[in-house]
Image (spheres, rainbow, N blue to C red):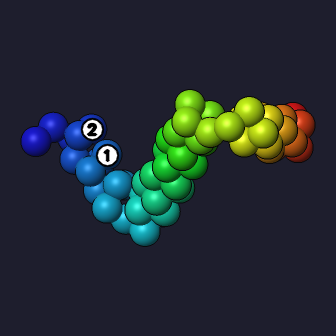
């Protein structure tokens, strides 16, 4: 195994790396759930999800 790939694997399996992976999985789940709600949901549901994302994006930047 090359040095750089070994370092990446070690970082992933450390606690900090694990927290990063967990955070990424939560974000992926939330985005997937929002996508499902937008595609299947009623117009009111779509509007609620859109407002939620607008608020989050407004709070971020």
- Outermost residue, bottom direction? 15
In the rendered image, the vertical position of residue 37 relative to residue 39, given as above or below: below
Between residue 54 and residue 47, name the one nearer to us.
47
Q: Could you tell me if the residues under marks 1 and 2 are in contact, i.e. CB atoms within 8 Å?
A: yes
The answer to which of 22 and 47 lies nearer the viewer is: 47
Kindly identify which numbered label has been placed on residue 8.
1
Viewer-side residue, 36 vs 9: 36
Comparing 12 with 44, the one in front is 44
In terms of secondary structure, where does tag 2 sit? Answer: helix
Q: Residues within 10 Å of mark 1 (few under 14, many from 20)?
A: few
Read off the residue under disc 2: 4
Between circles 1 and 2, the one closer to the viewer is: 1
Q: Is residue 59 above or below residue 54?
A: below
Quadrant in which the N terminus is drawn: top left
Q: Does the rendering let one see residue 20?
A: no
Q: Residue at x 49, y 49 (%)?
A: 29
Q: Is residue 16 left or right of residue 38?
A: left
Q: Which mark identifies residue 42? A: none
Q: Residue at x 23, y 40 (%)?
A: 5
| Quarter that holds the C terminus | top right
Q: Is residue 8 left or right of residue 2?
A: right
Residue that protrudes farthest toward the left in the picture:
1
Q: Position of residue 50 (x, y in %)?
A: 77, 34
- The number of discs equals 2
- Within-10-Å neighbours for mark 2: few <14, some 14–19, many 20+: few
Residue 48 place in picture, x, y as percent: 79, 42
Q: Position of residue 49 (x, y in %)?
A: 73, 41
Distance of label 1 from label 2 (alpha carbons): 6 Å
Residue at the spot 56% in from the left edge and 31% down from the top edge: 39
Can residue 42 be seen at all in this image of the molecule? yes
Q: Is residue 55 left or right of residue 25?
A: right
Q: Secondary structure at mark 1?
A: helix
């Amino acid at each position: 195994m090359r040095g750089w790939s070994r370092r990446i694997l070690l970082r992933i399996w450390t606690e900090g790396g694990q927290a990063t992976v967990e955070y990424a999985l939560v974000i992926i789940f939330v985005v997937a759930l929002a996508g499902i709600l937008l595609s299947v949901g009623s117009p009111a549901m779509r509007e609620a999800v859109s407002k939620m994302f607008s608020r989050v994006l407004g709070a971020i930047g």
